[in-house]
Image (tube, rainbow, N blue to C red):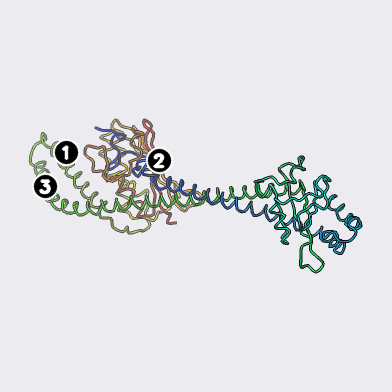
Amino acid sequence: MQTMAEQPLEGQGARSGSIGSAVPPAPEAVRYSFTRRFALLAFASIALVSAASAAFLAKTLVEETIHHDAVEVMQFVQSFTPLAEAEEFFRGTGDRAAHLEAMAPLLARIAAMPDSVHVNVYDREKRVLWSTKRDMVGKALTQNPELDEALEGELEVESSLLEERRYLKPEHAFLKGISDNFVETYVPIWSRDHRSVLGVIEIYRRPQPLFEMTQTLVRAVWLSALLGALFLFGSLFWVARRADRLIRSQQRQIVESETLAAVGEMSAAVAHSIRNPIASIRSSAELAHELDGESVREPMTDIVAQVDRIAAWITQLLVYAQPSSPRLSRVDVAAIVDACLVDFRRDLEKRQVTVLTDFAAALPPVVGDGALMSQVFVTLISNALDAMPSGGTLTISGRLPQDGNRVYVFLADTGVGISPENLQRLFVPFHTTKKSGLGVGLPLVRRVMNRMGGSIDIESVQGSGTTVKLSWPSAK
C-alpha cells in the first residue's frame, strides 16, 4: 500500500503549508516576466525623467539665484551713482580729474563690496576708464560679448556656476588669482533721461556664501528627485506586482473553469453509463454473499466494498465538476465528526488507528452545509488513514479563538508526512500519485470550504505526520 506522503488524498500531489501555495507554480521565467519587464521599464523611465527634471530644476534655481544676486548688485551700484558727474565722466567732457574725484566714493564702495576681487569701468568705446588693476586703464577690450550686451542696456552676469568658461577675455590676463568659482556682473550706467547707456561697470566677485547656498539647493533638488523617484518606483512596482498576481490568479481560475466544464460534461455521461453495471455487480455480489458459503463471503465483501468505492468516486467527481450552492445553516461540527467516525469504525480497527477527539465544551455551531462538511471530513479522514498504513493516532480537536468569530478544527495524524517535492501541487485538480486515485479529493475539499466561507491550511513534515486546519464562520 502506498503511503500518504507518496499518494496524498485523491487529487493530492502533496500537502503544503497553506492553500495559497498549493497552486501549481508557473515556471520562474514566465511567472515574473511581466513584473520584471515592468520594473526595468519603470526604473529606466523614472530615472530618466527624474534626472532630467532635477537637472533642469537645479539649473533654473542656480540661474535665478545668480541673477537675483546680480540685480541686487546693480541696484546697489545705481543707487550710489551721481548721474550728473557720471555723464561727464563717461563722455570725457570737462575736467576729467574732477569728475573722477566725484566718482571716487562710488568706485570705492564698489571695490569694497564683500567678496569683490576686481572692478573695471568702461565707456561706450569699450575703453577702460578706471580699474582696480592700473595696468588696464586706457586699454580697449573689444572681445567681450557680455560687455556688448551691457552697452545695449542689459544686465549681464557670467559665472562658472551657470556654464563653463568657453574662452578667455583680454582682461583675464590681469586676473591670475581668480579661481573658477566667480561671478562677473556687468552693470549698465544710464544717462539722467534714461535714454542711453553711458558706460558699464564690470565687477568680479567670489561670493562664497552664494556658492554654498547654490550647492545646498542643488543637493536638495537631487536628493528630492532621488527620494521621489524611489517612492514612485516602489509604488508602481507594488501595484504592478499586485496586478500580476491577480492576473495569474484569474488565469488559473479560468483554466480550472474550462477544465471543469469539459470534465463536467464527460463525467455526467460516464457516470450514467457506469452506474447501471456497477449496481448490477453489487447486487450479484450481495446475492452470492448470501447464498454461498464462508469461503466466498470475504471476496464478495471486497467486491461490494470496491463497488462502493467506485460509486463514491463518481459522486465525488460529479460534485467537483458540477458544484452547487451550499445550503448554509447552523451546524454542529462535533456531531458531524462523530457521525463520520462511525462510518470509518471498521477501517480504523482494520488499520489499527486510534482516534482522539477533543472539542471545547463551549464550541458554538458554525455556518455551513452539513452534507458538504461530511464530505470534507470523509475525505480528510480517508487521507489520514492512507498516511498510517501501519497504524497510528488521529487527533481531531476543535477550538474557538478569543474573538469568537471563527471556529477552528484540527486533524493531526502521525503518518509518514509529505515529501518536499510534492508540497507545491497539493490542491492541483486531477493530479495524484495514487494508483487508484482520481485527483479531486483535496481540490474538492478546498472548493467546498470556499463555498461555505471557510478555509483550509495544511502543514506537513516528512516523517512527522500532517496537520490539517479547517475554519468556518461562527454561528453564535
The kind of residue tagged 2 is Gly
Q: Is residue 115 visible?
A: no
* Residue that carries the numbered disc 2 in the rendered image: 17
**Tags 1 and 2 in contact by the CB under 8 Å rule?**
no
Q: Which is closer to the viewer, label 2 or label 3?
A: 2
Asked where in the image residue 390 lies, by quadrant, the reply is top left
Q: Seen from this angle, which residue lies furthest left? A: 291
Identify the residue shown where x is 36% and y is 55%.
452
- How much space separates mark 2 and mark 3, taking CA atoms? 44 Å
Q: Which mark is residue 283?
A: 3
Dot 1 falls on a residue whose secondary structure is helix
Circle 3 residues within 10 Å: few <14, some 14–19, many ≥20: few
Dot 3 falls on a residue whose secondary structure is helix
Q: Position of residue 32 (x, y in %)?
A: 40, 44
* Residue that carries the numbered disc 1 in the rendered image: 302
Circle 1 residues within 10 Å: few <14, some 14–19, many ≥20: few
For the C terminus, the image quarter is bottom left
The kind of residue tagged 1 is Asp
Q: Is residue 145 left or right of residue 136?
A: left
Q: Is residue 243 left or right of residue 343?
A: right
Q: Is residue 364 left or right of residue 51?
A: left
Dot 2 falls on a residue whose secondary structure is loop
**Tags 2 and 3 in contact by the CB under 8 Å rule?**
no
- Circle nearer the N terminus (3, 1): 3
For the N terminus, the image quarter is top left
Identify the residue shown where x is 77% and y is 43%.
174
